[in-house]
Amino acid sequence: MAEQHEKALVPQIRFTGFTDPWEQRKLGELASKRIEKNTNGIKETFTNSAEHGVVSQLDYFDHDITNDANIGNYSVVHPDDFIYNPRISAVAPCGPINRNKLDRNGVMSPLYTVFSVDDTIDKLYLEHYFKTSRWHQFMFLEGNSGARSDRFSISDSIFFEMPIQCPVLEEQELIASFFGRLDSLITLHQRKYDKLCVLKKSMLDKMFPKGGSLYPEIRFAGFTDPWEQRKLGELFEEHSEKDRDDLPALTIIQGGGTVHRDESNRNLQFDRNSLSNYKVVDTGDFIVHLRSFEGGLEKATCCGLVSPAYHIFRGKNVDSDFYYLYFRSKRFIDADLKPHVYGIRDGRSIDIEGMKTIFIPWTNLAEQRRIGAFFDRLDSLITLHQRKLELLRNIKKSMLDKMFV
């Protein structure tokens, strides 16, 4: 690829060997509206989602919301047809345009605009073009949000006047192939990420006893003793050490431990003169914070000070990674902790003395550490794929901006 100076109808980045300016054409020169009605009684209804593209309505809504009495007036959608959905969203400020990649016919509400394109433009190139914001300015200038604030309004005659910037067909195909490979990589890492999340959920369910049993369904070799149920207050002591204003103030990240407030991207104001009243936490301590009633207990990942409104618990000869799994589990939050939550909505609080009486699972420290280390490695893998996903999505976003005019 070669990087070029920005000028009219020349992208910032393009493949080597292409130097000619792109051509501006009207959508109506490349495409025609499909006016075929559902006279053959097609039953499957499609919808066009800004996030998921063209999907079957049954998959998207878990049920068919089509009015059978009106389905004869619906538009037929063929494979590779493009569909414009005028519904506005944060990710599609003037509505999404997506290609039907389902390899079958379906029908769509007449509220959608369905169109097919000829062979003078690469379908995959055009699909990625509509992932950019290049066409938005035309829509905002020529259309409006109409009477409904969630729906964009533009006439067909104006819509097909939309300018489309096109390179020669060979360059279109290279651009389409590049983004196709990038999408495949994103899909691959998304699947790996999803599988790891499912694996974690399954192993959490199987590596802790359930249903009154004292034996987990899956455990590491060499561990055979029954687990026990012990009161939380027997395994964890509440600490309330103060007068350590030499330590940094910390911010709680639900599901992400603690970070120094000065390094946090949250704009949190606090009086440094009051730090002597803040409570000390050491790495591995558990924190009952203001949202623990819905997110469980948080674990300190660094030493510092937290709000005096929080409650600090320090374990006695226990593995903090092991109990962090349990204290953030659905079982702990919804079954164990819930009876000790009082108040309504965001004003809910936890009865700390009552929480100390909760019976929680206990096994010997060696098994706790094996389980904690296993899930720590699994979390590292999940984080790795999550970061790769974010990187690939950022690359795609940047290249969509730089490879189109």
Image (cartoon, rainbow, N blue to C red):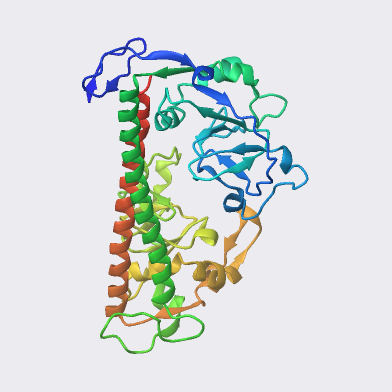
Q: Is residue 91 in sight in this rendering?
A: no
Count of marks placed on residues:
0
Q: Is residue 174 left or right of residue 42?
A: left
Residue 227, image x and y in percent? 39, 85
In the rendered image, the quadrant that contains the C terminus is top left
In the rendered image, the quadrant that contains the N terminus is top left
Q: Along the line of sight, which residue is nearer the eye, 63 or 34?
A: 34
Q: Residue furthest top?
A: 8
Residue drawn where x is 25% and y is 24% of the image: 15
Residue drawn where x is 66% and y is 49% of the image: 43
Q: Is residue 201 left or right of residue 371?
A: right
Q: Along the line of sight, which residue is nearer the eye, 376 or 154?
A: 154
Q: Along the line of sight, which residue is nearer the eye, 138 or 26?
A: 26
Q: Is residue 35 in sight in this rendering?
A: yes
Residue 333, image x and y in percent? 52, 67
Q: Is residue 155 left or right of residue 379?
A: right
Residue 309, image x and y in percent? 50, 55
Q: Please determine whether, in this image, residue 165 is positioned above or below residue 343.
A: above
Q: Quadrant of residue 177?
A: top left
Residue drawn where x is 46% and y is 67% of the image: 329
Residue drawn where x is 50% and y is 67% of the image: 330
Q: Residue furthest right?
A: 69
Residue 297, image x and y in percent? 45, 63
